[in-house]
Image: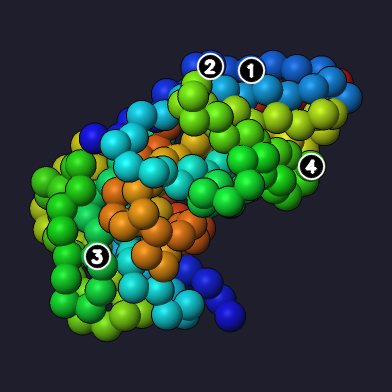
Amino acid sequence: NAGVTQTPKFRILKIGQSMTLQCTQDMNHNYMYWYRQDPGMGLKLIYYSVGAGITDKGEVPNGYNVSRSTTEDFPLRLELAAPSQTSVYFCASSRQGREQFFGPGTRLTVL
Amino acid sequence: AQSVTQLDSHVSVSEGTPVLLRCNYSSSYSPSLFWYVQHPNKGLQLLLKYTSAATLVKGINGFEAEFKKSETSFHLTKPSAHMSDAAEYFCVVTDNYGQNFVFGPGTRLSVLP
């Protein structure tokens, strides 16, 4: 039982490049979330999903896209990377109304 | 709408002394409340949770929190701080639907030898 896994752990992008952050959970949770955490700050919700095929915007969705084709996977896509997207990205999953389980994070730098 | 206020951005205690991290919330629903800990360069780990059962909740590593509806508070305490407790602590509120987890800004706990 691995919980929530994220890849890659670290990535450096150039402005305008694109990439996908991968997130997988093996707990059969319906709910999945993507957050970003800027230095010295709390977590801000980017997108979330309440089940396969259903996604919705969070507080800071601009510049990002998501999809949820399976219960297990919830990838986050950055289409045109910008320096403002330099952050640590956390994926989380939960059962409805229950505590969230977090992945180890992806540290992204855009230069 | 829900919100969370963590009253102190930084708390510093001496090893062996009590810890108090304060959290106040606002919610239109019967809330579920959580405390998470984040050690440097790590992910978030659940310390404890309140989900409408006992108002005094015990968590891992000797932490506990008390839900006080009249004060809309969920303060985190520990009788005796350990050096390994130095970390960032987040108070989180959600409604029963679990679609909207609202994080507080965090409190950084420093433990002095």
Letter of the chain that mark 1 sits on in the rendering: B
In the image, what residue type sits under mark 2?
Asp
Whole-percent x and y of residue A52? 23, 78
Q: Which residue is mark 1?
A: B11
Q: Determine whether, in the image, residue B71 is placed left or right of residue B66.
A: left
Quadrant in which the N terminus of chain B is drawn: top left
Counting other residues with Cα less than 10 Å from the Cα at mark 1, is it few (<14), some (14-19), or many (20 or more)? some
Toward the viewer: A9 or B46? B46
Rendered position, A10 above or below B26: below
Residue A23 in view in this figure: yes
Whole-percent x and y of residue A14? 21, 50
Cα–Cα gap, marks 1 and 2: 7 Å
Judge if badges 3 and 2 mark residues of a common chain: no
SS category of the residue bearing label 1? strand
Q: Earlier in the sequence, mark 2 or mark 4?
A: 2
In the image, what residue type sits under mark 1?
Val
